[in-house]
Image (cartoon, rainbow, N blue to C red):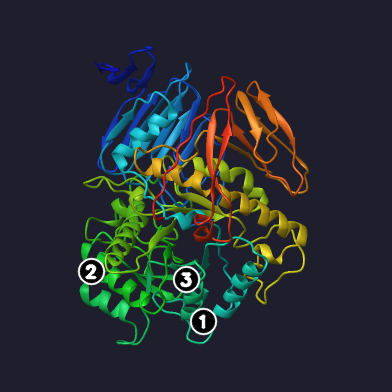
Amino acid sequence: IYSLDFSRDPFGVLLRRRTTGTVLLNTTVAPLIFADQFLQIATSLPSRFLYGLGEHRGTLLHSLDWNTLTLWARDVSPTESFNLYGAHPFYLLMEEGGDAHGVFLLNSNAMEVALQPAPGLTWRTIGGVLDFYIFLGPDPNMVIQQYQQVIGFPAMPPFWALGFHLCRWGYRSSNETWQTVRAMRNYQIPQDAQWNDIDYMDGYRDFTFDPQKFASLPSLVDDLHKHGQHYVMILDPGISSTNPHGSYWPFDEGLRRGLFLNTTQGQPLIGQVWPGFTAFADFSNPDTHQWWLENLQSFHAHVPFDGLWIDMNEPSNFMDGSEDGCPPGELDSPPYTPAVLGDSLFAKTVCASAKQKASVHYNLHNLYGLMEAKATARGGELTSLWGHGWTVLAMSLPRTARTDPPAPQGCCGAGLLPPLLWDKALTSCPQLSLLGGMRDVGCRRAGVVGMPGRDGVATDSPHLPQAQDPTVFSPAARTAMKDVLLTRYSLLPFLYPLFHRAHLPGDTVWGGSLLVTPVLEPGVDSVTGYVPRGVWYDFYTGSSVNSSGEMLKMSAPLEHLNLHVREGAILPTQKPGTTSKVTRGNPLRLIVALSQSAAAWGDLFWDDG
């Protein structure tokens, strides 16, 4: 389906699609540069319709007007033009004739991708090799499937993971957390999981909980389980290093076994995160996985959590490098530094020269979160063999690993993007889509700092966000949230098979049957959205609209969600309950939306959840 030609002068390769003759790659347009710490290769592009190369905040369709995208995992509030949490060196391009292809550079080093109006693209990385995978599609879904065949398919989430999850930074106690859960039940608003941020910890130390403020945490988790609900807590990879010897097993034992990132001098690299001075677990070391599992199992015996939110795994550091800075040399100060936020590889992370079991951090930085996710997920799998395991809910993770068999980020975790405020609502949709093949990914609905406009709810601390759960809103807003959550719960039998198809053949989760037209700005009562060609039925009323493939204005009062079903689709639904467990026991229904030729198709995947 393709031809590959080599050119000696000018040096390069040309890749063509045989059916159309379209040149997908032409690297003769600029010289290849191949040095130890500077690798650059450029290509022409067959069109300007280029997507992917996450993680960045911006539009779904990239601008090719001298736009440079940097890939180097960084913990920072989402900012235009800078490198963010994840590194996904993969793009999807729509060709002029409607075919699609994808390109993946299997390289974990810091890199830039420069987009040029020619149209053209230049890959620029400061380590590793140039190991490209080209996916010929020819449609976008098949491109993503082929990409998954290389990097590994997404994990199958448990059924409850598709329900409503509630979290807040600023719960002052387990009792306050519990009050929120009870209020949700009182208003009969669906909820499947309650999360806790770092508030629950004792001195912000991993694998601990505050013996005063969160003394009732085990009882809260027990209560959640009795109501068919689940508990998820946060964990960070920075391990507190300042406790008296013998008082904090995670650090003492990690130090004894030599499981932390080391300086060039062979001593644990000490940075600073929430608990103060910390050492950083080396997840490239298989021995670290065993130590991590032992810590998780020990804590699980007291607080039987169901999921883990692994955070700060860029890895994030409140210092630049370490408490002693970083040594001079070509790892921390390479001959060429890509356009990273902070202008240095160790800005708000650890030194690139830090030693890890598998390599130096210079080569492993973009894989750090992935390796933590694999260790955490593997622990959950092992634990579930003899009882109650856990699943992984993680910050946005880089996806540039090759393993044997393929088992990168898709194997073991989900992605959680930064807070979603009105000004970020519009960019959140493309930001999710730009993460290549990541399926289990979503936004936090409200912010960590800065709040959607609303009166009457505050905390004692100006640094902690206001409560944002549905119970604290006005009756009208609360009812609207409850109704839309009940709609979501009724659609769980439709959504679950989408994730199963993503897990096995590697399909996209979007599906082709449901169209949601969200309101992305405050204070409006209408929304204009694109409706693909064909007949679409209003999910609630059954009224139809026949679109030629156009932008349509729709009424959008607070109590109404614009949700349409495509002609020819069959949707399995279920009478919704207040948890996914209750919902699963209710009658199943089918919504059949006949096409103009009186045909329809749908499917159902069902297991024990």
Could you say which is closer to the camera, residue 450 or residue 537?
Answer: 537
The crowding category of the residue bearing disc 2, from other C-alpha atoms within 10 Å (few below 14, some 14 to 19, many at least 20), is: few
Residue matched to label 3: 225
How much space separates mark 2 and mark 3, taking CA atoms? 45 Å
**Above or below — where is 333 with respect to 309?**
above
Cβ atoms at labels 1 and 3 below 8 Å apart: no
Name which of mark 2 and mark 1 comes first in the sequence.
1
Could you say which is closer to the camera, residue 124 or residue 493?
Answer: 493
The quadrant the N terminus occupies is top left
Q: In this rendering, which labeled residue sits more in front, label 2 or label 1?
A: 1
Q: What SS does tag 3 mark? A: helix
In the displayed structure image, the side of residue 606 where residue 407 appears, left or right: left
Residue matched to label 1: 214
**Above or below — where is 250 with respect to 553?**
below
Q: In this rendering, which labeled residue sits more in front, label 2 or label 3?
A: 3
Name which of mark 1 and mark 3 comes first in the sequence.
1
